[in-house]
Amino acid sequence: MIKPILVTTAIGVLMISGGLAQQSNKGGDAPEFIAAQNSDQWVFSKFKGSDVIGPNNEVIGGVNDMLFDKSGKILGMVVGVGGFLGLGQKNVAIDMSAFEPVPAASASSQAPVTGSKDPTNIKLKVAWTKEELQQAPDFQYFKPPADTASGAPPVTTGSGQRPSPAPTPMAPLPQQPKQ
């Protein structure tokens, strides 16, 4: 019982500190390599799709994305709220300090608490209900302004439809002699 509490506390301290798995260079400009993940570090693939639960442990959304700045500091998570199978879903960005990591097995009242030894198997708990998050501002992804002054053709991803080639004129059909 005490071990999950200690793990949850340690994880919470890491989230509040603002820097996950950051290491300093030791005498040089070359970046260091990280050989392995520790038990107190998370990878984003664990968060993406993770359930976000409300104050009553009900699932109120799921993690869709992460927002971080140029220095690598994690600012928040983009949570999809509402909708069904992704349709009609609203994205809400929530500051990292608002999340409380809880062991996945203990977060749901339907699932019995198991003796899972994986401290990275968590759900993220917030103080808001689903209804409150649906009233929150819709997160808008950055859209760079269109570059119309340069006269250069617009950059495309290649995923659009190509225009149809102009139809080639057909040769006239040969005339049949009249009988």
Image (spheres, grey):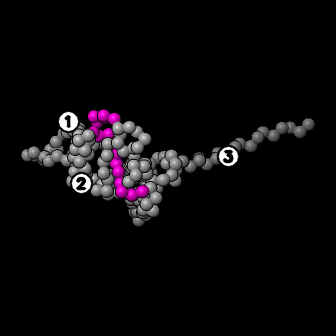
Q: Which of the two marks, 3 or 1, is nearer to us in this view? A: 1
Task: Tell me which amino acid carries mark 3.
Answer: Pro
User: What is the secondary structure assignment of the residue under circle 2?
Assistant: helix
Tell me: 149 left or right of 165.
Answer: left
In the rendering, at what x and y percent does residue 112 appear? 38, 37
Let me know if residue 55 appears in the view.
yes
Query: 84 or 57: nearer the eye?
Result: 57
Point out the image quarter for the N terminus: top left
Query: Label 2: which residue?
Result: 16
The label shown at residue 35 is 1
The label shown at residue 169 is 3
* Residue located farthest toward the front when viewing the structure as drawn: 1
In the rendering, at what x and y percent does residue 176 appear? 83, 38
Q: Which of the two marks, 2 or 3, is nearer to us in this view? A: 2
In the figure, 70 relative to 37: above or below?
below
Task: Tell me which residue sits at (67%, 46%) in the image.
Answer: 169
* Residue located farthest toward the bottom when viewing the structure as drawn: 149
Q: Quadrant of residue 154?
A: bottom left
Q: Earlier in the sequence, mark 1 or mark 2?
A: 2
Whether label 1 touches label 2, CB < 8 Å: no
User: What is the secondary structure assignment of the residue under circle 1?
Assistant: loop
In the rendering, at what x and y percent does residue 14 appear? 22, 49
In the rendering, at what x and y percent does residue 111 appear? 40, 39
In the figure, 5 relative to 138: above or below?
above
Secondary structure mainly formed by the magenta segment? loop
Decide: few, some or many residues near mark 2? Use Cα within 10 Å; few <14, some 14-19, many ≥20.
some
Task: Tell me which residue sits at (48%, 53%) in the image.
Answer: 82
Q: Which of the two marks, 1 or 2, is nearer to us in this view? A: 2
Tell me: 54 left or right of 118.
Answer: right
Task: Tell me which amino acid carries mark 1.
Answer: Ala
